[in-house]
Amino acid sequence: MIKQEPNKNIIEKIILLFNKKKYLEALDLSNKTINDYPDSILINNISGVIHTELKNYTLAKNLFIKVINLNPKYNDGYYNLANIYNKLGEEDNAIKNYEKVIYLDKTYYKAYNNLGNIFRKRNLNKKALEYYILTLNINPNYIRGFYNLAGVLQHFILDEKNKYINKFYLYLLENKIIVRPNAIATNVINGLFLNTNLKYNFSLIENNNFPINLNKIIEGLNENKLLLQFMKVCPVPNYYFEKNFVKIRNEILNQIYNLNFEKSYLKFLTALSAQCFLNEYVYSKTDKEIFKINKISERIKKHINVKEINDLEILILSCYNPLYSFDWSKKINPSNKLEEIFILQYKNHNEEKKYAQQIESIAVINDSVSTKVKKQYEENPYPRWTNLGLSIEPKAIKEVIGNINLDLNLKKINFSKNSEILIAGCGTGQHAITTASKYKNTNILALDLSFNSLAYAKRKAKELNFKNIKFIQGDLLDLKKLNKKFDIVESVGVLHHMNDPLIGWKILTECMKDNGLMLIGLYSEKARENISEIRKKIRSLKIKTTRTDIISFRKKILETKNQHWESIKYSPDFYSTSGVRDLLFHVQEHRFTIPKIKKYLKKLNLFFLGFEDTYVIERYKKIHSQPKDFYNLDKWEDFEKSNPRIFSGMYQFWCMKNKS
Ligand SMILES: C[S@@+](CC[C@H](N)C(=O)[O-])C[C@H]1O[C@@H](n2cnc3c(N)ncnc32)[C@H](O)[C@@H]1O
């Protein structure tokens, strides 16, 4: 009689070949084994997996169906079959089979995760979210589940109580590379209000229950781990939070020499200090507060060598100005309790100063607009960021571009083995590092005008262990001096800050290889209508671009009842100094329309390949579902007319010289 399952050694050999990506050899051996053991569940299943990898989906499907027939309780068989249906676009069949898996094994977390993915694709975001929560409740170490959860949270607002969600928000905010904290900030704010007692604590602050209740309030806030972490990773984009933070900062300053529970104050003040540092001290302060901080600073200076200074004094000052700005800061020997803030506000600053001196330059900046823009970003590098959303793993360029669904035939393009990518106007590195995480075997050159932005970028690239990015200072107008051509050129949020964006764009085009690809990001006139209004007002009032003027104008906007200005309060940029400057006080800003982009593309002999933002594309698809419509700029123009805020995250699109 034929033995039903083959020898363990054979199975191990096939799996080894499979893991080494020697799929054809693995298939050869598994086919031979199937001949000997036609009814083996294991070998039929493995064979199906190999065929899946080789994209022989129909063969794989038949094998998995066979496996299930051999053993109707074999949940891996249902799971693999569901995956195949998913790949074949037969989502209903996929759902049925994933449900079967869960029926057989309630802890099969990947089945919940994949169901979540299908519901997300169908825009059933709430349902998708529930499935991701189920996934992560079973396996809290499943990193893909967190990526998926973060993906939903970026475009779906959960505004009801949920007893699990805050722990996942906390995880996402603690992780450095899954998601930009800003992208999920509205959800975190809802989670804090709905699932914690923050409202009660804020009500105590609002009702001026000081000084009696200060200890109680601080204890309440300290218990809220999510709040403290949120304060440490991004400027909290909400005026209600800001009002309460400002009030409590003032009250702690008032009582600084009478505070009892040092430990609890250390915890909250560390988070508040980080928050104020991250928002670049955008909160306004009264003359009384300034007087008090100066006095404390003088006292510290006088006693710096004596053990009389307490950590709370230093911390409260760091909630008003960065530690590095105090002339006594180099003399302090930080205690363990101050270490976190010392790293953030002193050590990092010194490291950046060192990097700024090491960065190479292309040439001295000549252009007058570039000189002004440089000055702005030297003073306020933008954006300041802590965590970001990186790719889960780097892939070949073709695979990454293939997933964007552009209007081009990738088969006709040959990218070099070690492709060269240019990030023109890389700012503080978020863009360059994100790109570096996407592509395998690439060298990235990241250029910017501002040494301070580049130094920030370099420190962060080092922290995240990215070794293939070279940072260089210069004007993109001088790029030709490098005598280099790139496979991919990316420039997002840069050309519209030049004197003549067309000249800048032309230079970028000339730096691109003949079959290279280009990603461009430009401001939309329509999406920024309210911003242009405020900019006009700033000009008419002749408000200067000093830090004090920016902060006091911002305060006016916050307090105004002017309906037209209301929407600006929802912009995350409004909650940091560099953000407000970039948003409203930029020294140079052009805005584009789709016809203008069309005109420029024509002048540069570039072909439009499609937009980048999947969220924007999904919304467009609901109206224009024909594939050819995705690349029809006239239709996009109509779409923007009826959705004027759709490009609030800029027009971000791909183009190339010779359309393949
Ligand atoms: C709004 S920031 C965007 C940064 C980055 N692309 C991102 O998306 O995070 C604009 C950056 O472009 C840089 N920039 C503007 N004009 C430039 C030029 N002519 N050459 C090089 N960089 C420039 C600025 O210094 C600034 O850091």
Image: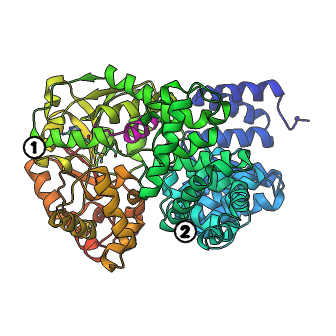
Residue at image position (49%, 42%) is 390
Residue at image position (62%, 35%) is 309
Q: CB under 8 Å between callouts 2 and 1?
A: no
Residue at image position (43%, 50%) is 281
Quadrant of the rendering where the N terminus is positioned:
top right
Which image quarter: residue 454?
top left
Give x and y (percent) for residue 213: 70, 65
| Label 1 SS | helix
Q: Is residue 201 above or below residue 520?
A: below
**Front-most of 301 and 152?**
301
Quadrant of the rendering where the C terminus is positioned:
top left
**Front-most of 247 and 116?**
247
Q: Which residue is mark 1?
A: 503
Mark 1 crowd level (few <14, some 14–19, many ≥20, 10 Å Cα): some
Left or right of 104 on screen, residue 24: left
Q: For the magenta stretch, what is the residue range?
A: 424-437
Amino acid at the residue labelled 1:
Ile
Amino acid at the residue labelled 2:
Ile
Residue 435: within the magenta?
A: yes
Q: Is residue 478 above or below residue 544?
A: above
Give x and y (percent) for residue 397: 39, 36
Q: Is residue 69 above or below residue 490?
A: below
